[in-house]
Amino acid sequence: MKTQKALWGLALGAALLTTSALAGPEVVEGPGYNPACFAPWDEETKYLQWEGREGPYRIAVVNGFVGNTWRIQMIQTAKAFAEDPTISDSIAELKVVSTGTDAPAQLGAIEDFINQGYDAIVTIAVSPDGFDRVIRLADRNDVVLVPFDNVLDTDQVMQVNEDQYLMGRTYAEHVLGELAAVGKTSGKVLEVRGLAGNSVDRDRSQGINDVLDESGGDWDRVSVVGNWDDGTAQKVVADAIAVHGEFDAILAQGGTTGVVQAMLDSGHPMVPISGESENGYRNYLAEYADEGLKGISIGQSPGLVAIAMKAAISALEGNVMPQLISVPLPMATYDELEDGVNYWSDLPDNFFTVNEFPPCDVNISGPAIMAQDESDTN
Amino acid sequence: MIAKPLRHNRGFAAALILFLVLFVVYHILHPRGFSTAVFIQNANETVAIAFVAMAQTIPVLVGGLDLSVGSVMTLTACLASYLVVGTPAQMIFGMFLTLLAGTTFGVMNGLIVVFGRIQPIIATLATGAIAMGLALLLRPTPGGDIDADLNWALTNSVFDFAETFGLADDGNAAWLQPFANIPVPLIILLVVAFGVWAPFKRTVTGRTLYAIGSAESAAKLSGLPVRRAKIAAFGLAGFFASCGGLYLAIQTSSGNADITQAGAYTLNSIAAVVLGGTSLLGGIGGAIGSLVGTGILRVISFYFRILSVDPLIQPLIEGLVLLAAVSLGALRTLRIKNKLEHFR
């Protein structure tokens, strides 16, 4: 009797072991599917492959914090994208929940969607750690979990983000290029940083300063903290201009509408500038480029959610996917701006303009997202 | 044990009925309702906030609010992410230290309130900020590496617990089967609630809490140990908050000094206390009611995962349901003839 029980236990254990060994993604050799859109982060990035299955799929978006424009626009983008003809046939159901900044609630929501048998769960993690349990559950149940924007400190799941360091480098390269075009290879620059202690701020600033170092020019750098917020950035830039006088260029990484507003208010000459993708900033670029505001605009797009959903679907179809996907930086320079295409003079200043990723076939226009917005609040 | 509070506290009775209705309907609608996996998920999501709500209940019973409970939970979670490591014996010692730290912090709150003669709401606003500062010192960025087996065992069913640690024939022993599907987090919650709160309530100190909440000067004049009871109230709040912190750390295998989360937990704990039938004026209610209140709070948000509700109006609906739930407890006001009956 006892032996029988032990054997039964062994058999059950073996069954559990085999299922957990089979479930989850397999680490495979690259290259991955559609590398123009799903670019691997670097050469070390490994590739994952799930067993393909028939669509259409059930997808859940588990957002954490809600309450700023970016997050609301992200949610609207997810809904608009699910109805997009290029993808709507692959999605049987899309559910979006926001749990607030509450780790157990976010973990619980993910676990609930795993229990409900959803095929993929897209999430912005409230913490870079602490997802071990849901990752284990997702693998056991063959659910594709895709953190994006705020990603996890793990290589066990497929994740989607933009390369913040590269963004910082591109900001500085553009600005130095514009300065070189007018013959300046040294001078005084103002850096407007983001939220202190945040890895995104750290990486963007690192990129900016590395390019300044490598240029060999003698750059007098003044650094202020604008928290990616228009109001804060406007105040600190006004203070910096009052104290330091004129700058040859401004390297901002957010709150850029406020930065330009401060320049206008203080009568600071229009100089080369870098910044995020706020609609207000792009409006200023279009208006004042002739006076010297030769800027570049690159942003962390709320449209990342669409890429994450697309990556999840691609993984469910059985395609080979990079573990860490680097989304091409959505950028526009002052000479590429066109009203109604990549900025909108009739939309609010705090609207995030970049939502289109041509290599990924993600083309949700600003007005489409805003239209979604209105129909929902009524 | 249940019948008596039901008769004495209609708020609690209403809360229990509301919770059961919401919970059963949720499971009927859920594609895998009434299954172990869903019960485990429900329990996991509820433990930390339930402990914090129980912590909040006790200062509320004496007529105060403890604004530090969320921060103490966060601080002890950060502490646990350093202490609960190593051999099993070391981990258990680390858990003990974590709970001791939280209790000490609570006792300190009590001492400040009693001897500093400061209103609890102000005193704990300050000490809460101190706790948050300490948490940020411990974990400026999220981190820690609590044992994966411990995490798995304590966030699953009794069977998984036994299997992980090789107990009871890896969870297959016949005697274990009646309990095998019960979620471990639920057991932890009930053991602490009924093992600590229920006996405490019957002591002289415990009864004094209610007396203070009803009429503090009368309690004092009757020779009840008012100071001791107040210090015990905040100490016990610290203990329950650290239970929440310890579980949160194990659940997430890490510590994270998240200020927003600490604030949200403090506010939600007050909501859970009120939902559970405890009066914010003190003297009526109890920690078991807050467990039920937490259940209501969480179940409402569970619905958004199975029903199609527009994500941007979810907070609005949650607020409306909460308001309705709290109002249910106040309905009896409409029926009584004499307002003095409130105080019976």
Image: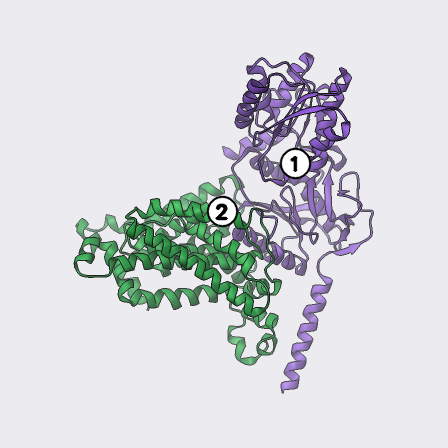
The residue wearing badge 2 is B261
Q: Nearer the viewer, residue A159 or B234?
A: B234
Rendered shade, chain A: purple
Up the image or down, A37 lies above or below B277; here it is: above
Residue that appears at 68% across and 14% down:
A292
Q: Are marks 1 and 2 on the same chain?
A: no
Tell me the shade of chain B.
green
Q: Chain of mark 2?
A: B
Distance from the alpha carbon under mark 1 to that under mark 2: 26 Å
Q: Are marks 1 and 2 in contact (CB under 8 Å)?
A: no
Mark 2, Cα crowd under 10 Å, few <14 / some 14-19 / many 20+, is many
Q: Is residue A9 above or below residue A133?
A: below
Q: Position of residue B153 (x, y in %)?
A: 57, 66
Q: Position of residue A262 (x, y in %)?
A: 56, 19
Residue A209 visible here: yes
Q: Secondary structure at mark 1?
A: loop
Instruction: Tell me, yes or no, if residue B13 can be seen here.
Output: no
- In the visual, does B332 lie left or right of B103? left
Say what secondary structure mark 2 lies in.
helix
For badge 1, the amino acid type reads Gly
Residue A188 at what x, y percent from top left?
Answer: 67, 21
Q: Check residue A303 in the rendering and tell me which mark sits there, or answer none.
A: 1
Judged from this view, the residue extending furthest toward the bottom is A1
Instruction: Examine the image and state in which quarter residue A163 appears.
Output: top right
Residue A15, above or below B280: below
Chain under callout 1: A
**How many numbered discs?**
2
Res A186 label: none
The 10 Å Cα crowd at callout 1, few under 14, some 14 to 19, many 20 or more, is many
